[in-house]
Image (spheres, grey):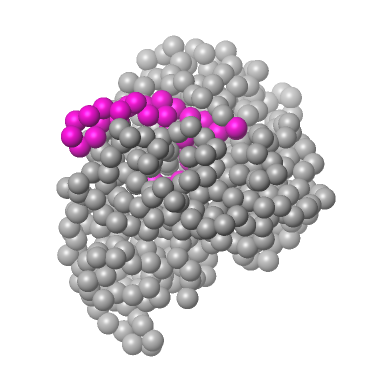
């Protein structure tokens, strides 16, 4: 049976190495030729996460990595298809991050060459987890091998377009004047960043259900699928709303993260206001390391960031945002209480990995380990995992008709969905 993994939310930020709490070593990225000012490349998008191809040390196999502003070092979480990766000298270290468990073991390697399309990173640090605790490939439905973050963002102005699924790496020196012109144009809003330990933070204002406004400092975490996470245990002014759902929120480096789902009235970033974003409120036990090592009130994930076209400029501690056609999309959550994944990446076979206690799925007798073979009258094999997840989380869906298999016996369930957060 597949271990519990998160479908709504991936907590992969705040990666800390006990022996290496300082920022990543001074490697650098550059474009392939000095004549190029920018490199544009397409990316794949899975559950709001940007996935790009990466080659390490001219290895035989190309890895698929999540572009994640929430990690300070390149992290290989697993090699699920027997991929071969050449690394320079490695040594075993202890790694810890979000979650309720203990630190885990990893291999640390430095002095590596990392290639992304026609950009090359020199003298790069890489961490490799001994155990694949995230199971990213089963979570996302395709082979995914890890995360890459600060090492790319520190050397380029990075532009991400979630609508058209492309990314541009702009040479900082050659593009800086254009960036400054854009921030004076009416189409872009400049938002100051705080770059701390290789990660970007932003100041924002939230309005809670009682109308109270709270100034918060949030990590921008493009490696998290959710919209917003608030640490109510770190800020006495933040409270969990009365209408809430107790939920398993995901896995961090140090184990499971549990907490609540709820709504805030709105969040304001720069001049833009987004209404009723679904918000997670993790338990203190699951985020205790984040509270110790960073002064923040939570994080912003890709479900919110995808509503903008964005340019990250770490060197000048700023970003530009521009609303996309997704800006006014309704925020929604998985009202069924079923989390699903695929046991075999790239094969459209879906298994229930978690059932939220007290949810309609729980009350209907659906169990972890059940296979879903039909969704609303259509074979599940006709859906990609992304498409299936969208059905489960789409706010306009009021009923799910499922055919399931358990121990070679098939059965049907009809789930009448209710929004428990309103």
Q: Is residue 210 above or below residue 179?
A: below
For the question of whether residue 92 can be seen, the reply is: yes
Task: Give the extent of the magenta segment.
Answer: 197-226
Locate residue 189, reporting x and y percent: 40, 20
Q: Is residue 220 magenta?
A: yes
Q: Is residue 350 left or right of residue 336?
A: right
Q: Is residue 277 left or right of residue 152?
A: left
For the question of whether residue 384 can be seen, the reply is: no
Out of 325 and 146, give the one closest to the viewer.
146
Among all residues in the image, which is located at the extreme bottom?
408
Among all residues in the image, which is located at the extreme right?
89
Q: Is residue 162 magenta?
A: no
Locate residue 75, reporting x and y percent: 63, 49
Q: Is residue 69 above or below residue 9?
A: above
Q: Residue at x 60, y 55 (%)?
A: 103
Q: Is residue 389 left or right of residue 63?
A: left
Locate residue 365, reporting x and y percent: 26, 76
Locate residue 313, reporting x and y percent: 55, 24
Q: Residue at x 34, y 46 (%)?
A: 281
Q: How many marks?
A: 0
Out of 180 and 241, give the one closest to the viewer.
241
Out of 373 and 290, give the one closest to the viewer.
290
């Amino acid at each position: 049976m597949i271990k519990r993994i998160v479908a709504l939310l991936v907590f992969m930020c705040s990666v800390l190495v006990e022996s290496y709490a300082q920022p990543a070593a001074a490697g650098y990225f550059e474009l392939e030729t000095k004549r190029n000012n920018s490199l544009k490349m397409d990316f794949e998008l899975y559950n709001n996460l940007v996935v790009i191809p990466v080659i390490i040390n001219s290895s035989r196999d190309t890895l698929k990595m999540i572009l994640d502003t929430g990690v300070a070092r390149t992290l290989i979480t697993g090699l699920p298809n027997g991929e071969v990766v050449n690394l320079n000298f490695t040594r075993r270290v202890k790694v810890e991050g979000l979650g309720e468990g203990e630190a885990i073991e990893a291999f640390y390697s430095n002095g590596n060459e990392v290639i992304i399309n026609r950009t090359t990173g020199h003298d790069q640090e890489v961490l490799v987890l001994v155990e694949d605790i995230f199971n990213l490939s089963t979570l996302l439905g395709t082979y995914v091998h890890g995360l890459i973050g600060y090492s790319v963002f520190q050397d380029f102005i990075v532009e991400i377009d979630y609508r058209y699924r492309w990314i541009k790496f702009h040479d900082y020196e050659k593009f800086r004047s254009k960036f400054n012109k854009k921030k004076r144009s009416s189409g872009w809003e400049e938002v100051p960043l705080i770059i701390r330990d290789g990660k970007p933070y932003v100041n924002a204002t939230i309005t809670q259900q009682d109308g109270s406004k709270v100034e918060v400092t949030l990590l921008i975490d493009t490696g998290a699928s959710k919209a917003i996470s608030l640490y109510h245990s770190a800020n006495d002014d933040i409270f969990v709303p009365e209408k809430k759902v107790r939920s398993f929120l995901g896995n961090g480096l140090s184990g499971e993260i549990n907490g609540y789902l709820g709504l805030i009235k709105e969040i304001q970033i720069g001049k833009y206001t987004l209404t009723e974003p679904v918000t997670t409120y993790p338990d203190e036990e699951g985020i205790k390391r984040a509270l110790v090592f960073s002064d923040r009130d939570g994080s912003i994930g890709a479900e919110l960031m995808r509503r903008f076209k964005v340019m990250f400029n770490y060197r000048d501690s700023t970003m530009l945002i521009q609303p996309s056609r997704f800006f006014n999309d309704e925020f929604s959550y998985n009202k069924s209480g079923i989390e699903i994944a695929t046991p075999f990446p790239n094969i459209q076979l879906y298994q229930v990995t978690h059932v939220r206690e007290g949810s309609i799925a729980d009350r209907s007798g659906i169990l972890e380990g059940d296979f879903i073979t039909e969704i609303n009258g259509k074979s599940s094999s006709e859906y990609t995992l992304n498409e299936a997840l969208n059905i489960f989380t789409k706010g306009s869906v009021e009923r799910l008709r499922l055919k399931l298999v358990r121990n070679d016996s098939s059965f049907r369930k009809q789930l009448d969905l209710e929004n428990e957060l309103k």
